[in-house]
Image (spheres, rainbow, N blue to C red):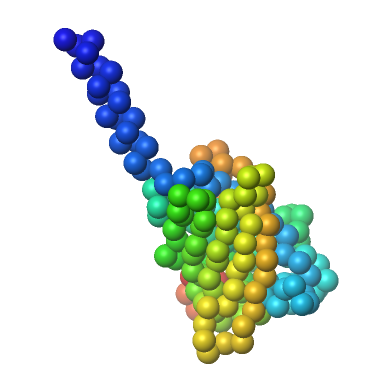
Amino acid sequence: MIHRTWPTLTLVFGLGLAACTTGPDVDGVWHAAAPAKGANNSLLFSATEPQTPLGVELIIGAYGPDVAGLMRYYRSGQFDLARSPLPPRKECECAFLHEAKVDATGRVTFLLDACVPGRSWDAPLELRGELTLMDDGRLVGTVAVDDPGQPSGTVALSFVRVGTTATADPVILDCQHPATLADGNTASGL
């Protein structure tokens, strides 16, 4: 009797796990270099060095159709120069993903409501991200202004997975939010 029950329980448990997944695996740490400031990028760029590609890191944890994570910015497409919201730089460091979802096709959508390097470095700006997991493993799409009171702006990004969230150092999820202007950039870390 136990032998007949075991396969049934395994099948039910396996179906329960399958119900939690909605599509392709988008979990991970992803890197993209934003194009230099210009026609292809009126949104994410280095305000001090407009010809230097800005590094954009996307950290995603998918829980069924819901996604949690953040977008972090680096001063270089080499991901070697971290941005800091603290004095003296008071840069736009990162933003948490809001209303983030992934569907069965691997399409990830999210909102950002925080500062944006280059465009709105010291005040929040609402952005909408739409990215799709491609057959070659890249996460490709756009981040665009989603605020009717602001001029439009879009940047196309192509992310490559560089690690998993399970093996990443938890410090990558530290998105600082200074409490006052004296403490740093209050529009970072929202």
Looking at the picture, does residue 132 appear above or below residue 114? Answer: above
In which quarter of the view is residue 164 placed? top right
Looking at the picture, does residue 28 appear above or below residue 142? Answer: above
Say if residue 80 shows up in the picture.
yes
Give the left or right position of residue 157, taking residue 14 as reference.
Answer: right
Q: Position of residue 89 (x, y in %)?
A: 68, 73
Q: Residue at x 66, y 54 (%)?
A: 159
Q: Position of residue 170 (x, y in %)?
A: 52, 47
Q: Position of residue 40 (x, y in %)?
A: 75, 73
Residue at the bottom extreme? 149
Q: Residue at x 32, y 33 (%)?
A: 15
Q: Residue at x 53, y 47 (%)?
A: 26
Which part of the image, by quadrant, shows the N terminus?
Answer: top left
Give the left or right position of residue 120, taking residue 189 as reference.
Answer: right
Q: Residue at x 61, y 87 (%)?
A: 151
Give the left or right position of residue 66, taking residue 75 as reference.
Answer: left
Q: Position of residue 80 (x, y in %)?
A: 74, 54
